[in-house]
Amino acid sequence: MKRFFNWFNTILTRNKKTLDPTDQIDPVNQTRSVRSAIKNSISFATAITLLLLLAMYLSFKENKVFVIFSILTVIAAFFIAGCVLGFIFGIPKKYQNKQAVVQLDKYGKPLQPTDPNYTDNSSLEEISDWITKIIIGLSMVQFHAILKMIADAADNINTSLKGAICADQSCHLNFYVFSYALIIFYPIVGAIIGYLWTRIEFPYILDQKDRDLREANRERDRAENKLNRARELNKLKEEDLQALVQTFTPATDSMKGKREEFKQSQQLPDDPQKGKWGGKAEARDRKVTAIIRESSFDPNWFNINLSVTSTDPNQPLVGEVVFNLHPSFMNEVQKVKVLDGVAQYNIIGWGAFTVGVECDEGKTKLELDLAELTDAPELFRKR
């Protein structure tokens, strides 16, 4: 016996290929070969099953559908049981260390490394000795009981098939060996296919879900960052607006004081631009309009948006437009360039007044009394 083991060890040593420590296994080729093995196993099991069903269909004249259905049920039960067993042994676990692990997509191409990653279940190797001892122990102690369980299952399948095919007790057909072969063959094939699929495809599914989850978390973080930046920007805008209002308050108080002086003075006209520019808001294919609304920082002050446009598309407005405002404004004469056929000027005012407009190099004069705008706030029109 010792000589036999020495001879066997010599054969293994002689046929064993010496590997360079720097050599690395190509994960792409390895994965493709395993996937090819899965396909070949499935093809082999399918071919055997089809041949078996065809033989059963041609051999029996009665109850063909029932016999085929019964055999398919038995095959499916043992095959699924083997797949579940292979799946349990091949379930991957989280990769715990920081070594690089190459994961492959369904086309065999390496994926970008991710953390955490998945690798083969090392518990299969860890418990291999334990399982071997258990199997040896059960084989020595319960070997006859195991054989009896398999024999009973094969006998039950044999009885079921004979009852479906043979109508009398004189039938000599025996499906015991056939049933025994079903019990041995399909669980083994199912276990191989389930284990190989779980080792190759299931880690990819877990890793893909993990990447999707991390990508969703990154999208959430980006959205939160954008929201935080928007909040910071709004806060800065509020601070700028508050500073602008505080800076603008002395100017508005001065404007308000000048308006009161014009109203109370008997020598100064309350509305100096009234009647000075022809009294028409539309003339020579030109038109002046205004939109009045309360300001966002103080309801006692109003935003005045003045616009001058052309009413004739063939005579567009060009050049500059001069707006003549109330003298209470710091700059009562404002020149505005025409952009895209429109001259706009936006100001803050306390009360209504008349606006005089000069356009077309002074050839066209327009006049608009803001107190006559019916859509303007009532407080603005009364002042």
Image (cartoon, rainbow, N blue to C red):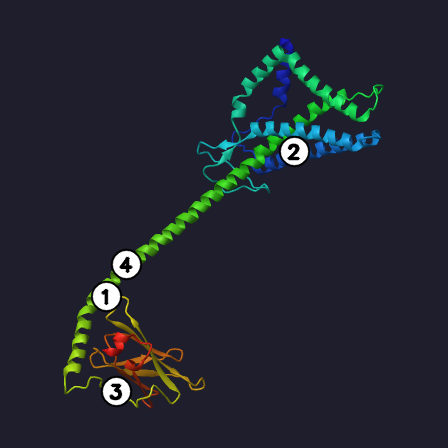
The amino acid beneath tag 4 is Leu
The amino acid beneath tag 2 is Ala
Residue 236, numbered circle: 4
Mark nearer the N terminus (1 vs 3): 1
Circle 3 SS class: loop
Q: Disc 2 marks which residue?
A: 37
Q: Is residue 297 left or right of residue 78?
A: left
- The answer to whether any part of residue 320 appears in the image is yes
Mark nearer the N terminus (4 vs 2): 2
Front residue of 85/1: it is 85
The amino acid beneath tag 1 is Leu
Front residue of 347/188: it is 347
Q: Disc 3 marks which residue?
A: 274
Image quadrant in which the N terminus is located: top right
Nearer mark to the viewer, of 1 and 3: 3
| Disc 3 + disc 4, Cβ < 8 Å | no
Q: Is residue 111 left or right of residue 63?
A: left
Q: Disc 1 marks which residue?
A: 244
The amino acid beneath tag 3 is Lys
| x and y, in percent, of residue 175 in the image | 77, 22
**Where on the picture, by quarter, is residue 361?**
bottom left
Nearer mark to the viewer, of 2 and 3: 3
Circle 2 SS class: helix
Mark nearer the N terminus (2 vs 1): 2
Mark nearer the N terminus (3 vs 4): 4
Establish if 102 lies above or below 322. above
